[in-house]
Amino acid sequence: MPSPPPDWVKALSPAGPQGSELLAQERASSNINVEKLSELLHTKEFLQRQKQLVELLQPEKVFDKSQNHTLGRVERLQRSLAKAKRLQQLAEQHQWSMEELHAANELIGEPTPYGLHASMFLVTLREQGTPEQHKLFLERAAKYQIIGCYAQTELGHGSNVRGLETTATWNPDDKTFTIHSPTLTASKWWIGSLGRTANHAVVMAQLFIGGKNYGPHPFVVQVRDLETHQPLENVYVGDIGPKFGYNTMDNGFLLFNKVKVPHVNMLARFSRIDKDTNKYIRPALPTLVYGTLTWVRSNIVLQSGGVLARGVTIATRYAAVRRQFQDRDADINAGENQVLNYKMVQVRLLPLLASMYALHFTGRGMMRLYQENQQRMKAAASPGQDSRGAGPEELRAGADLLADLHATSCGLKALASTTAGEGLEVCRRACGGHGYSSYSGIGSYYADYLPTLTWEGDNYMLTQQVARYLLKSARAVLSGKSADNDTSRILRNYLDRREKGASFDVLENDADIVEAFAWRTAHLTFEALKHRDAEKRSWNSLLVDFWRLSTAHSQYLVVRNFFEAVSSPDLTQSIDSDTKTLLHALFRLYSLHTLEREAAEFFSSGAVTVRQITLTRTTAVMKLLDEIRPHAIRLVDAWAIPDWQLDSSLGRSDGKVYEDLFRRASQENPVNDLVFDPYPWNTAVLKNEPAKSKL
Amino acid sequence: MPSPPPDWVKALSPAGPQGSELLAQERASSNINVEKLSELLHTKEFLQRQKQLVELLQPEKVFDKSQNHTLGRVERLQRSLAKAKRLQQLAEQHQWSMEELHAANELIGEPTPYGLHASMFLVTLREQGTPEQHKLFLERAAKYQIIGCYAQTELGHGSNVRGLETTATWNPDDKTFTIHSPTLTASKWWIGSLGRTANHAVVMAQLFIGGKNYGPHPFVVQVRDLETHQPLENVYVGDIGPKFGYNTMDNGFLLFNKVKVPHVNMLARFSRIDKDTNKYIRPALPTLVYGTLTWVRSNIVLQSGGVLARGVTIATRYAAVRRQFQDRDADINAGENQVLNYKMVQVRLLPLLASMYALHFTGRGMMRLYQENQQRMKAAASPGQDSRGAGPEELRAGADLLADLHATSCGLKALASTTAGEGLEVCRRACGGHGYSSYSGIGSYYADYLPTLTWEGDNYMLTQQVARYLLKSARAVLSGKSADNDTSRILRNYLDRREKGASFDVLENDADIVEAFAWRTAHLTFEALKHRDAEKRSWNSLLVDFWRLSTAHSQYLVVRNFFEAVSSPDLTQSIDSDTKTLLHALFRLYSLHTLEREAAEFFSSGAVTVRQITLTRTTAVMKLLDEIRPHAIRLVDAWAIPDWQLDSSLGRSDGKVYEDLFRRASQENPVNDLVFDPYPWNTAVLKNEPAKSKL
């Protein structure tokens, strides 16, 4: 690493009011109780654990982050495996729960090659394996004696799971399955932890019995030798190469040339083959499988608030430290203005600040609903194992709710991850030039997050599921057979009031804001229904309408969840009334800013008038920016993201932005060890080095 | 590199219709004359030169691209300097023009450490130096005997050039300047080619004479020894570290501790110090300096079409090769549908396809205007050197037009670079999961392009300049003193018609589309004027309105330029009528899709009715998608981007998407040389290697 700067450089400080002073002023100008708000968001336990984990992890050299942005992929992947191993050692040593391991992983700030083993491989074995299979695979996997992955996506098929090409053919003679890749596009692709790390895979393959295709099923297949770690015979496996982000993960490919696995390797909790009759036994409870994806998507919604919070924390703190230009209307002798005072910056950052709170509360609401229902259904499904017992009616009600949750989770996953992903980029740009530096801490985090917009259901594809559900619900409402849930309620409500029209006072009444969003959803739903059922338009020609409909409905869900959270009695107990007022302001900012951006739909549905929209834009949103501005720093402080996790010069909680940028550039940057020969006629790139050694 | 795959893998092909067949079908289904359209876009000369350059460069090992996404920054930077040197050698050998060198650089596809020397350093010396200074600096720089950069931005100041902190103090005693960095934030920062390559810099510094500040001026300062390439005494210089992209460039920092330079080092074409009297001589022609930035921005507009074209070419070709799901309304036995047939994909890609044509023609129009005016002004300004001569009136008219061009270039730079940058990301996501692979060719190109949204005027900051100009023009129109240009025309037109209202037939009449966009600009201009002049609202409170206004005006300019281009008689001469019809469809798609996205402004300005907007969305845009769809592949083919430049598995002109993804992953991916030890209890990451050597 480069030698330290000369004394005359060390003696320099940033000009004008220091970053630390500016952040101190910001914090002094707000009366928000940061600690209470943090606890409301994360719980006291989480915050304590986070603090302990930072103290434990940060000093270890293996978790050093300083070269993350500089190293090539070969080196980064190796370091990441070293981190993963060390985390696993610590997990065993400290007997961490899954949550603790997850929290530790979040702090080190990158996906590791154990990622898919620790999540999807273990989860799939647990949820889809029989007790015998648990003994055979899960127990060893939990101890990392075997390392696995979840191999579903193929080179030619992502979203369309039914189109997968890998086959698993049942051989009645020797009671085995033959796993085979008939084409190049059948190659498993994008499989996390498979490229270099895993020695086992859960492979999703089309199950063929007696020439008949029973659709995709999960098979445990060993792919590498447990000792030598070399691929087994007739297995071709490797890493799929560099990506836009996520380069510390070894996403892999996998091809099989008629590889045989025994009967026990088909995960058989839900469906299986009877060894004796060679018959396929249908799954008893398809909805439970379906539940896992709902859970995964709900988690994405829950996490999206925190993802966005990283960008907003960095950009908001830096905008308070960075000063640029004088206010045009200010006294000529006034100093430069904090960038955060400019309305053009506020209108980009503060609605995102509101969004991170909105998404957090929405995700929480979803997870609560999901878990309650899952408990109920598990109890209902296993009367033998659970003394509470439950009848088929409860099971059906649970399945109904799960269908609603499924649609909800699809739409919200799309909206939340798009909001978080695109929001991070808005934050990066709001940091001006320095946002582009890796030391901003936003760029690579954004790049690592982006797959979330595509995986677990592409954000555009998913909107069809929401639309399908809403159309179905609307048909049920029209035929008088609607379910007893909120979706049906807003559709019925719209039909009841449609004649006399809406008159929501979105500027003065918070509950009316929620109703205006519900009205828009219902209006778009019945419009789409008319196109599809009455006008018989093709599904394809309506995809754009469906996407709009899903977005509208999901925005309604966020607005409703946020409103319920800030209106709940719990809130009044845990925080003071000033903070509560501010959370209401955040609710209004999120809602009205969204309303204004989607003005055309609100207007054409008749939910609000053009005059209301104009007032929203020119007055209400501007007033809310003024109201929230003084509390911006405390509102991001409350998210309590440790500096070590942020890993950002711009977002440091102490405001030492310029000192840190300078320190990293001059002291942690191996490029400054190079001495170039700059002249084109010398082929050598470096001084005193022959050219050939380089290329 | 990894060993080749086994024979059973080599024998595999992708399933179903092959990519090459699908692209052949696409090409067969359109009658567009690709060659003629290419020539219209790029000229025959450009296409020939491009072909020759690819043939020359591609075989050279130094320009190999296969490891670009894998290597670390230290290695990439060295390789990039090697490329830059080789390009310079070839440039001398083949006597390339600036355009040829630029074209070659575009083909190799990355910024190199010579980038700022070859552009801003040479340009500044040429445009702002005296003949004496040309002899002293420019001649040596042109021969690469000295390597330079342009050092303006500082750690604490980007957009606000007047706030720069570096000082240049005139010493009357020894006739020198003292260049000094008084604070840490005065450090030059982001300076391209400075980090490791340059030995000279044009430093922008506040000029102080006798204690008085005359504002920022350019000084040539040597920063490294010409022999040893070590920094000179009292100069602290280095690379600023890793970035989100652009990592093959050595952006640098630079601090001075009272470094003296002689009188001749202040670039003195426009303003200077009289050595004898120690007096400051004011610039004769400030507008000419101001012209350089206008040129730089116009160039960004011109290039933005080509930038977007890379993403659109890749995503459109891949969407024709990729098949996923059956059409829901199709026969059950139909195969999977080409992704490009889905309306949700079309509505994302085809408007961007239209945008790339729109921006290209707009950039061309601007460059033509700029160059014409510049010629005229140069002739007028140098009557001694140019026999044509010209009076002060011509000079004033030229300055007026330059002011209009300046505002135009600010707004269009912001709109065009935002459209291109964000459009690339839309293209990447439209490629689904594989868009995230580096082999898509979009991710790193997007990351390298992103600074364009911030540099040469941050895209949000710039909108204030447009608004200021429009307000000034509106005041002139109201006072009856408007200039004779299009901006004044549309403002006057609006005032004349405001009473009776607009009635533009945007669905049937192309000229009316242009007028509707003009109407919206004028409406927003007079609204903003009312807020500022009548209601006396603060500048800051209007920033969001100004941003909207600038965007609206810039969209009008694109729509107008595109309309003029597709309606020009030249077009009819060079292409057939079917192609011309299609270009009109692209014009309508760009315009109507924009109109629909900005519906609220069009409606509230009274430019169109709600009914027209609804019809635009549900009918007109959908019809245009159908109309353009069959020609999509030929329309991207016409852009004629060589495969080697695209460097994309997904965007290959031969459609061999899956074969290429597989080849690169398995054969060009050094990660596949690693053999991991996957178990957490072994600290060693690789098999047979002690752990310590890694960390």
Image (spheres, coloured by chain):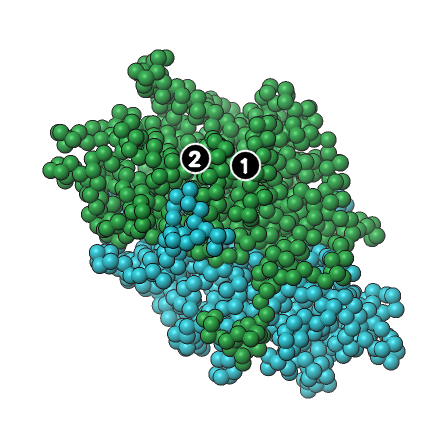
Chain colours: A cyan, B green
User: Which picture quadrant has residue B491?
Assistant: top left
- Label whose residue precedes the other's in the sequence (2 or 1): 2
Crowd band around label 2 with a 10 angstrom C-alpha radius: few (<14), some (14–19), many (20+): many
Circle 2: element type: helix
> Left or right of B655: which side holds B274?
left
- A133 is higher (above) or lower (below) than A430: below
Q: Residue at x 66, y 55 (%)?
A: B663
Q: Residue at x 63, y 76 (%)?
A: A228
Task: Name the foreground residue: B289 vs A616.
Answer: B289
- The numbered mark at residue B305 is 1
**Circle 1 chain:** B
Res. B477 visible in picture: no
Q: Could you say where residue A177 lies in the image, as x and y percent from the top left?
A: 80, 72
Residue at mark 2 to residue at mark 1: CA–CA distance = 14 Å
> Left or right of B198: which side holds A361?
right
- A540 is higher (above) or lower (below) than B129: below
Q: Could you say where residue A142 lies in the image, as x and y percent from the top left?
A: 61, 80
Amino acid type, callout 1: Gly
- Do circles 2 and 1 both sit on a common chain? yes
Task: Name the foreground residue: B480 vs B679.
Answer: B679
Q: Residue at x 21, y 46 (%)?
A: B259
Furthest-left residue in view?
B173
